Amino acid sequence: MAATAPAVAEPIVEMENISIEFPGVKALQNVNFRLFPGEVHTLMGENGAGKSTLIKALTGVYKIDSGTITVGGVPRRFAGTADAQSAGISTVYQEVNLCDNLTVGENVMLGHEVRGPVGINWRKTHEAAHEALIRLGLGDLDPKQPLSSISLALQQLVAISRAMVTDSTVLILDEPTSSLDANEVEGLFTVIRRLRDEGVAILFVSHFLDQVYAISDRLTVLRNGVVVGEHRTAALPRNQLISEMIGKDVDALNSLGSQRSRAARSGGTPYYSAKDLTRKGSIEPVDIEVHAGEVVGLAGLLGSGRTELGRLIYGADKPDAGVVTIDGKTAEVTSPVGALARKIAFSTENRRDEGIVGDLTVRENLVLAVQARRGWARPLSRREQAAICDKYLVELNVRPADPERAVRDLSGGNQQKVLLGRWLATQPELLILDEPTRGIDVGAKAEIQETIVALADDGMSVIFISSELEEVVRLSERIIVLKDRRKIGEIVNGPDVTAEAIVDLIASEGSGA
Amino acid sequence: MSTPVSRPSAAIRVISGLFHQPYVWAIVALLLLLVVNLTKNPAYLGVSVNAATGNLSGNVIDILRASAPIMMIAVGMTLVIATRGIDLSVGSVMAVAGAVSMEFMRNTGTGSFGTAAVAVLLALGISALLGTLNGILVSIVGLQPFITTLVMMLAGRGLAKVITSGQNTSATNEPFRWIANGTILGFPVVFVIAVLIVAVLAALVRRTALGLMIESIGINPKAARMAGIRPVGILISVYIVSAVLAGVAGIFSTASVMTVEVAKTGMTAEMDAILAVVIGGTSLAGGKFSLTGSIIGALLIATLDKTIVYMSIPSSATPAFKAVVIVIICLLQSPRVRSMFNRRRTRVITARKETVPA
């Protein structure tokens, strides 16, 4: 974990002992982070590791609970994004935040227009924009053409020009490549290298490993709100990086005992099977089978297609093609309504946006899916609702066990349990769990894992998706490995299957190593 | 201060419970307006009984009568707003419903009960049709509710004019007129009908799972879809309900004068409805809704209108006066002001505790 600094002595940004807590979640705990002038520094970590929280602390979006931020040797306390910008920190977000209806030059100079005696001098403004574009090697771009007429990749570069107009010393690029093709990425990297050579400190976030290795000088790995390593990129093998990102928790999870091995299946027909299930731009054709009582894990990094596959099976996204057989009969699942009718349930990784209905009570959240399947005209009686609440609040150990509390007031782990209860109440035959243990405390995590094993023992089919490979290996009988939206392997679990083996498979596949 | 603090009495508990309702300030404002009127005339709240007919009369009864159409559109608007939508077309639908019924009664000219019944059914039918169109455009085509119903607001007004050939159609039909001017047990028929409709609707929404689903869609449409709720049917239904209730309001407001003024009937009614909903504590962002709150809002707006007339405030100043009152209410129930009040109250309580010797 040798964190050697580049030749330049003084870091431009130094964050020390940063902690940020949200209700129920410690988003960052005593995080130290350094950024030097003239380097490209990548922030690595799975979803919920704290990357965005750290960026938002640095850009003044979030207030830090404790710790210090020093920029250019001066201690700073950011009360808002304007403070951070005046300290020389500029950010380009994943979604381009520009005005489509303005010209390229107007976008670059917005808020920094050149003023003359009678208001804005547009000629000089466009000249200044042109100079800013030349600085990034974009001299060919006409500042007077409308932004909407240029490609998304160029818009991204315009956004960077805009960030550099204020002579920023720190440039933050939050997943700038997620919607670019290979050539466009190369163009972006040329610009990034040019700025780096000018002495700008660049903080880069991406989940594409190849790009991280191509562009970054150093990287910092976060997991569960804690820094797990700060490295020179060139000195860090890929599989070590992946294991740091996904972690090997030797915590209370050991209470589950050894990993499950494949139960003897009498070769019967699987409960659920899909052949060539596919959706353009989402996942390439995949075959998957799940037997009754079996836990099948989906392993892969963020963006590997693990979530996309789960959504396709549930019908949350409509498959383009594929033959699905449920319980021996051909079926088509094209909507959540259809999936629930066929006893398939899906617990989303995106708890806040697609899971809980925040303003409703715990009780209302628990009964929602059952009620939706019955239709509005046949309401569950008070007694039936109370029965569901009593059963799942106790079984899943939800705290506080108060059905009339608004679910948004619960901690992340307890919200997750309420969601799990919602799906279990529909009595599914196939349960798809996407990151059911993310961002929740260790105790709740162990409880949820125990529940999953118990459900499978009772004969339920489970598809288990997690970014923590250790967890996938521990719970699954069979593991489907995904990379870059493709299935690259299927492993029958056994004593010799380890998280490392899967990491090696992902790291070696396609990289030529 | 010598007596130990006793358990709060039931009355205090009810009142403190009321203070947690978002529409508490609407109730306070309502009472204040009545007090203002009382200062001008101590007999303002007096209700007299006509010995011959048993009819009740008085300012309060007038307010109830005037609130009926606002109640109708406010309740429909509440459901639409709860789904993150808005229905700007209610005023125009009122005009269409009025135009259809008046035109029909004028052309048949029998004045019988049957004619009145057919006129009502025609008015409600065409309202439902317009509501269905709104609902389909919003839920299936995916247009923005604001744009959809804005177009319907313009088109509806035009449709009303086409139906009456641009004239202000009048008709004579006693059974129809009775809806607006008659009484049941002394109370205005419009008010009784409005109360019945609201009661049926409230039961429909809260005794079935409809309310839960409307709120889920309004709070988090993605999560609602993932939980297996079909939004299309529910969205179309709420727009139909809103339009049909607007049709009822249209019948209410044309029946009293037996004339539809195609350019004026239901004019800016959508504003009254939206205001009633907001005053009642339902957020324009959708989600949790309160039918009770909207009814109180409708009563408040009717009272405000009557007060303005009663206080002989010049008609040119009427909109400004109305605006001031409503802005104050909205300010009082905004989260920021409410949390300020709560802080105040806790400070007062802690201050009191500190003065008590340990």
Image: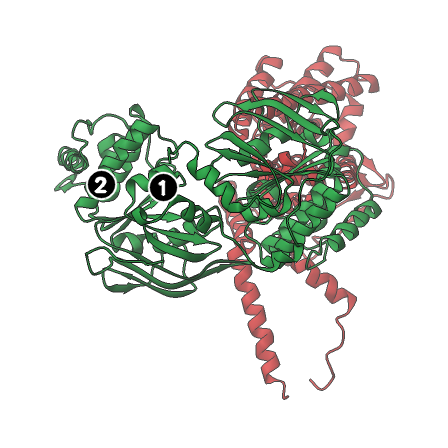
Look at 72% across and 23% down and name the residue there: B124
Nearer the observer, A48 or A247: A247
Horizontal and vertical percent position of residue A257: 66, 54
State which chain is coloured green.
Answer: A
The chain coloured red is B
Q: Which mark is residue A160?
A: none
Which residue is rendered at x = 56% and y = 37% of the image? Answer: B271
Q: Secondary structure at mark 2?
A: helix
Q: Nearer the viewer, mark 2 or mark 1?
A: 2
Q: Which residue is mark 2?
A: A193
Residue furthest toward the bottom?
Answer: B357
Q: Position of residue B318 (x, y in %)?
A: 52, 43
- In the rendered image, the vertical position of residue A68 relative to residue B149, given as above or below: below
- In the image, what residue type sits under mark 1? Tyr
Q: Quadrant of residue B171?
A: top right
Return the mark for residue A93. 1
Instruction: Identify the residue at image location x=62%, y=44%.
Output: A357
Residue at the far front: name it. A496
Query: Chain for mark 2?
Result: A
